[in-house]
């Protein structure tokens, strides 16, 4: 049975409409994917800034305590310094753990692999700082030893976080991430610091000068 001329003429229109609908569907999916990725990265950046601010506040307060102790503190002044650092460490560990949980609980679609990777990298970095502060809360002299996990995890963040930026980037997420990378690199390491040791603690003069009989600044003093 032959098809009618009217039906034959309808096929190109049907095919064209199907192709157009498919193009619209793909465009909508791409737009939805971009929108979700943009929102995820924007929230990740905000959560990271909160976490980084905890680290900055803690190290600034610790730096002030170390400076206040002076170059040659008395045994009583040295003990006060250790007590202050211990409390700052304990308080900072609590704040940093809460900030880290926000990063962990950030909802990310499973196909956004670059965002997942960046988030996991920062979770590891946050955990390294938690370990740093937890150690200081248990023994403040542990703050003055090398902590290589801080440096190694940060380098992974520096490598992976920029790759999560969506394109196009109308909200300047790349610039905001670059600011985090620059500020974090300056605070997590320094020219005079050993890799993985926060620059603040590279030269614990108040501790090493507290006793003329102490050759190893990491060895606990006995009073």
Image (cartoon, rainbow, N blue to C red):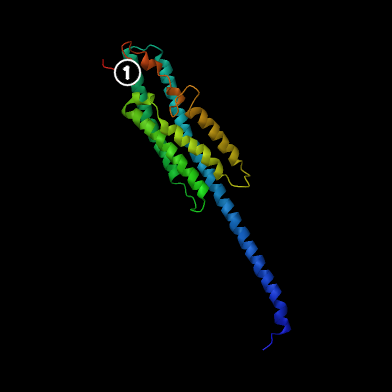
Hey, which residue is sitting farthest bottom in the picture? 1
Hey, which residue is sitting farthest left in the picture? 223
Say above or below: 76 vs 18: above
Q: Is residue 95 visible?
A: no
Q: Residue at x 34, y 11 (%)?
A: 74
| Side of 120 relative to 211 (left or right) | right
* SS under mark 1: helix
Number of dots carrying numbers: 1
Residue in front for this viewpoint, 79 or 14: 14
Q: Quadrant of residue 208?
A: top left
Residue 166 drawn at (x, y percent): 59, 47
Residue 153 drawn at (x, y percent): 45, 36
Q: Quadrant of residue 179?
A: top right
The crowd level at tag 1 (other Cα within 10 Å; few <14, some 14-19, many 20+) is some
Residue in front for this viewpoint, 50 or 125: 125
Work out which quarter of the rendered image holds the C terminus and state it: top left
Q: Residue at x 57, y 36 (%)?
A: 178
Residue 180 drawn at (x, y percent): 54, 35
Q: Residue at x 51, y 32 (%)?
A: 184
| Side of 150 relative to 38 (left or right) | left
Q: Residue at x 57, y 54 (%)?
A: 33
Residue in front for this viewpoint, 110 or 28: 110
Residue in front for this viewpoint, 24 or 160: 160
| Residue identified by numbered label 1 | 79
Residue 79 drawn at (x, y percent): 32, 18
Q: Is residue 30 visible?
A: yes
Work out which quarter of the rendered image holds the N terminus and state it: bottom right
| Side of 24 relative to 140 (left or right) | right
């Amino acid at each position: 049975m032959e098809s009618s001329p009217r039906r034959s003429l309808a096929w190109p229109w049907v095919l064209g409409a199907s192709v157009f609908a498919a193009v619209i569907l793909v465009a909508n999916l791409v737009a939805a994917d971009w929108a979700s990725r943009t929102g995820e990265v924007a929230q990740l950046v905000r959560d990271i800034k909160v976490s980084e601010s905890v680290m900055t506040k803690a190290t600034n307060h610790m730096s002030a305590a170390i400076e206040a102790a002076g170059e040659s503190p008395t045994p009583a002044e040295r003990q006060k310094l250790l007590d202050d650092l211990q409390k700052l460490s304990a308080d900072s560990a609590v704040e940093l753990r809460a900030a880290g949980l926000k990063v962990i609980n950030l909802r990310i679609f499973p196909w956004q692999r670059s965002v997942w990777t960046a988030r996991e990298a920062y979770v590891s970095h946050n955990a390294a700082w938690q370990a740093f502060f937890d150690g200081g809360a248990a023994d403040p002299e542990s703050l003055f030893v090398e902590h290589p996990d801080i440096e190694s995890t940060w380098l992974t963040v520096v490598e992976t976080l920029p790759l999560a930026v969506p394109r196009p980037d109308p909200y300047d997420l790349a610039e905001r991430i670059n600011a985090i990378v620059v500020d974090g690199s300056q605070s997590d390491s320094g020219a005079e610091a050993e890799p993985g040791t926060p620059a603040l603690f590279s030269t614990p003069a108040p501790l090493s000068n507290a006793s003329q009989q102490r050759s190893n600044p990491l060895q606990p003093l006995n009073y």
